[in-house]
Image (spheres, rainbow, N blue to C red):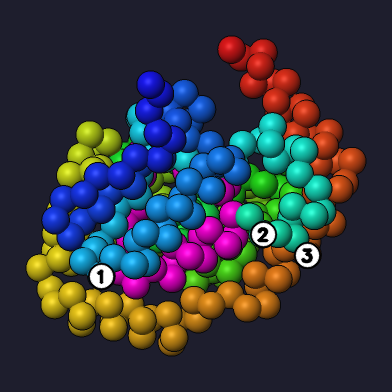
Amino acid sequence: MSEPILKLQRDGALVTITLNRPERRNALDKEMVDAFHHVLDAAWEDDSIGAAIITGAGDQAFVSGADIAELKERRRREALQSINSRLFQRIEDLPFPTIAAIRGFALGGGCELALACDLRVAGEGARLGQPEVGLGIIPGAGATYRLPRIVGLARAREMIFTARIIDAREALAIGLVNQVVPDSEVLPAANSLAQSILRQDPLAVRLAKMAFRIDGGSRPGAGFLAEALAQGILFDSDEKTRRMTEFLEKRTRKK
């Protein structure tokens, strides 16, 4: 019997969610998105959860990004459905704090998943970035409005416009992650951070998060729609198809 693509572990008030496709660097495809929604449906109803850790199986990737082969086939209709955006908004809106535990690559949708979490712990070997413009699209799941909130507008523009991948130390320096630890210590460090949260008054923590959501501009509004509209145009472009085909062929040659 094959393992689930999304694994859940419960330890008291702490839930750990593991994206479990290490052979595909935990790429975020529609099946994974659907599984995540199913988990979140249950989490919303469980008042006993005080914090959650989100991580990826294996050492190579937190989430390497969206599945490029699947993304290549998506067109305007799928872009306007905001498939990943809606999932990440649900994660950001969870009533309890979430911590991204990042080992290896967190690129594209993987970086955007980390941005949707409240806190981020990265291993020394972690690499983060938004390489979408090199594939003929834009970051379409929150980076254009979450990344500036976290690292500032100028740095967010540089990361998105250049598609540059940054290492963990630079991510710490610009405030993209909260902690950098040895790769083997990522989950223990995330767990320790979660336990620090769980020692506090649960209701006070939930209300503090609610206050951030009201005052911190976490509701994307126009940004959510702008990303969907831009992606709807780009998903139907010949250049997007060409660039993604080249990417997939290059990856096949490396195997």
Residue drawn 82% across and 37% down?
241
Q: At 58% across and 75% down in the image, what residue appears?
A: 220
Which one is closest to the eye, mark 1 or mark 2?
1
Residue at the spot 28% in from the left edge and 65% down from the top edge = 46
Residue 68: x and y in percent read 66, 35
Q: Position of residue 109 (x, y in %)?
A: 56, 48
Q: Earlier in the sequence, mark 3 or mark 1?
A: 1
Instruction: Give the alpha-carbon distance from disc 3 to disc 2, as whole Å.
Output: 10 Å
Q: Quadrant of residue 202?
A: bottom left
Q: State which region is magenta.
A: 84-109
Q: In this rendering, would 213 be left or right of 124? A: right
Q: Quadrant of the C terminus?
A: top right
> Mark 1 or mark 2, which has the lower sequence index?
1
- Label 2 element class: loop
Q: Quadrant of the N terminus?
A: top left
Q: Secondary structure at mark 3?
A: helix
Do the residues under discs 3 and 2 have CB atoms within 8 angstroms? no
Mark found first going from the N terminus, 3 or 2: 2
- State the image quarter where residue 73 is shown: top right
Q: Answer yes or no: do the residues labelled 3 and 1 have beta carbons within 8 Å? A: no
Tag 1 near tag 2, CB within 8 Å: no
The residue positioned 43% from the left and 87% from the top of the image is 215
Q: CA distance from mark 3 to mark 1?
A: 36 Å
The residue where tag 3 is placed is 229
At label 3, which amino acid type do we have?
Leu
Q: Which residue is mark 2?
A: 82
* Residue extending farthest left: 199
Disc 1 designates what residue? 47
Q: Is residue 92 above or below residue 60?
A: below
Q: Residues within 10 Å of mark 3 (few under 14, many from 20)?
A: some
State left or right for residue 216 relative to residue 31: left
> Which of the two discs, 3 and 2, sits closer to the camera?
2
